[in-house]
Amino acid sequence: MTKYLDDYNAQEELLMEQLKEVESAYAKIGIEEVDSRIAELPDRLELERLSYNPPDDKELESYANSKYEAEYIQGSEAIKNNIESLRSSLMESKDSLTTSQQTALESIDKAYTGVIESISNQAIKRGLGRSSIVMNKISETENAKASQISSLESATTLELEKIDNEIIQLESVKANALASFDLEYASKVQAELETLMKEREKKTAEVIEFNNKQSKTEGDYNFKRAKEINDIKDDYGEVSESDKTYYKQNGFYPSEKDEYKDRYDMASEFYLSVPAARAKEIFNENNDLKEYLGSTYYNQLRTIILMRK
């Protein structure tokens, strides 16, 4: 605990604390003014950035394939179905031809059987029976029948072979059609892939350009803002030659005059309230007072105290 010689020492110590508070208050005012001017400036600029994760080549290839996948499946099935329809039609032609042949054979057989029976019946009526003449006619008839059957079978066989060849050729037609369709599909996919790659390149360039512009705008603005802040601070920290001269003469700067006048008034009020002799003693013992009053006000107060009786 501090021991005081008398109550004036305690009051003087209280005065010093008050002077320190005034000093802090004025310093705070300066800081607050700086902060206030800085607060009036717009905030640091933080602009939006575009985010783009470009697909790789495999992903683009997948996109290109998927675009034409349904069309490819539909087209392939159409080719296969068309070939199958043609094959079915040819198979029906074969069945129809075989049926027609069988019907024709039955007609030939029935017709020639009737002729032979007629020859035999006529021969019996005439009493010729199995004469050589009758047998020759029957043989001629049977030969004619065999020739007609042979001609029919040969013609039918040729038609069936022709149809079989057409059926075999259908497989080649189908293979060629599918191969041509595959090339068309591959060409479409490749064209789409190239388009997607160009779009990816364009999008990437656009995003980079946009983000670079945003960064430049931010940088320019924030640099300007930082300069304005420094200028504001410099307004309170820059000391002119005239201010330096003023400081040498008074112990404070012109901008601090009101503050030091307040300090002087406080100190003057206290020391003039103390008996003259005691005031001189505690004034001369106070080594810190000059720092708070500045040389001009300190000397002014000192003169007044020394002149008191």
Image (spheres, rainbow, N blue to C red):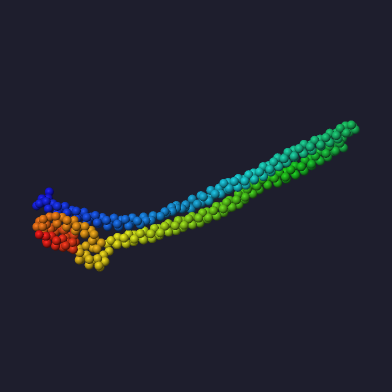
Q: Position of residue 178 (x, y in %)?
A: 60, 49
Residue at the image position 56 percent from the left and 49 percent from the top? 68
Left of 302 or right of it: where is 119?
A: right
Residue at the image position 70 percent from the left and 40 percent from the top? 95
The answer to whether residue 203 is seen in the rendering is yes
Q: Position of residue 6 (x, y in %)?
A: 10, 51
Q: Is residue 248 above or below residue 263?
A: below
Q: Position of residue 209 (x, y in %)?
A: 44, 58
Left of 178 or right of it: where is 261?
A: left
Q: Position of residue 297 (x, y in %)?
A: 18, 61
Nearer to the camera, 32 or 14: 14
Nearer to the camera, 163 or 174: 174
Left of 130 or right of it: where is 163?
A: left
The answer to whether residue 285 is seen in the rendering is no
Residue at the image position 14 percent from the left and 61 percent from the top? 304
Q: Is residue 151 above or below residue 294?
A: above
Nearer to the camera, 208 or 112: 208
Nearer to the camera, 72 or 138: 72
Rendered image quadrant of residue 42: bottom left
